[in-house]
Amino acid sequence: MKKLFGIVLIAVCFGLCAFTCDESDDGDVVTEFSPITSTTLPDEGKVNQSIEFVITHRGSNGCAQYSHNKTVTKGRDVFVTFFNSYKKDSFCTYALTTLETSYSYKPSAVGEYTFHFKQEDGKYQEEKITISE
């Protein structure tokens, strides 16, 4: 009987750990808007070739990390918004952090493109690049 109780106890402990010790659970991750503060967008580029540059954006605390970006293209206007994330229950400093992230864009036509980088309060920093053949 003691042996059966021991086996059942081990099985219950194993089962509890399998459901509560999952490190890949993203349910407690907070994702939020990350204001863009500056870029290294070049003045010119080539059509159908990726333009690669660095975007500096702000995290809301010491644990903030780049999460993803949203790019919307309307003609030759390119709207770029960045997001950061951090674990909800992490012990983080309240200091704002500066994050630098590589970004690339591949223009599909010749002409002048205007990039609109989203900042705080819904405002945009606008920068232009000339795309040639």
Image: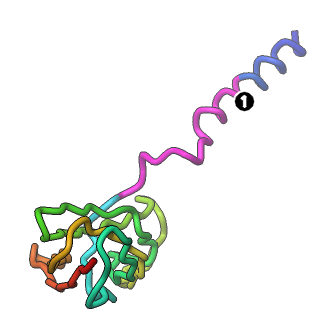
Q: Which residue appears at 39% of the width and 78% of the height?
A: 52
Determine the residue positioned at 23% across, 69% down.
80
Image-based side of 43 in relation to 26, left or right:
left
Magenta residues, start to end = 12-30
Residue sitting farthest toward the top: 1
Query: Disc 1 marks which amino acid?
Result: Phe
Asked whether 22 falls inside the magenta stretch, the response is yes
Q: In terms of image quadrants, where is residue 31?
A: bottom left
Report the colour scheme.
rainbow
Camera-side residue of 46 and 42: 46
Q: Is residue 97 above or below residue 86?
A: below
Residue at 24 percent of width and 79 percent of height: 131
Which residue sits at x=41%, y=59%? 88
Residue nearer the viewer, 56 or 85? 56
The number of numbered badges drawn on the structure is 1
Residue found farthest to the right: 3
- Most extreme residue toward the front is 133
Q: Quadrant of the C terminus?
A: bottom left
Residue 60 at what x, y percent from top left?
Answer: 32, 75
- Which residue is labeled 1 in the image? 14
Residue 82 percent across, percent down from the top left: 29, 69
Judge left or right: residue 130 versus residue 29: left
Give coordinates of residue 2: x percent, y percent.
88, 15
In the displayed structure, 51 sits above or below 38; it is above
Quarter of the picture containing the N terminus is top right
- Please give left or right for residue 24 compared with residue 37 in the image: right
Res 126 quadrant in image = bottom left
Crowding around mark 1 (Cα neighbors within 10 Å: few <14, some 14 to 19, many 20+) is few
Q: Does residue 35 appear to the left or right of 21 in the view shown?
A: left
Res 7 → quadrant: top right
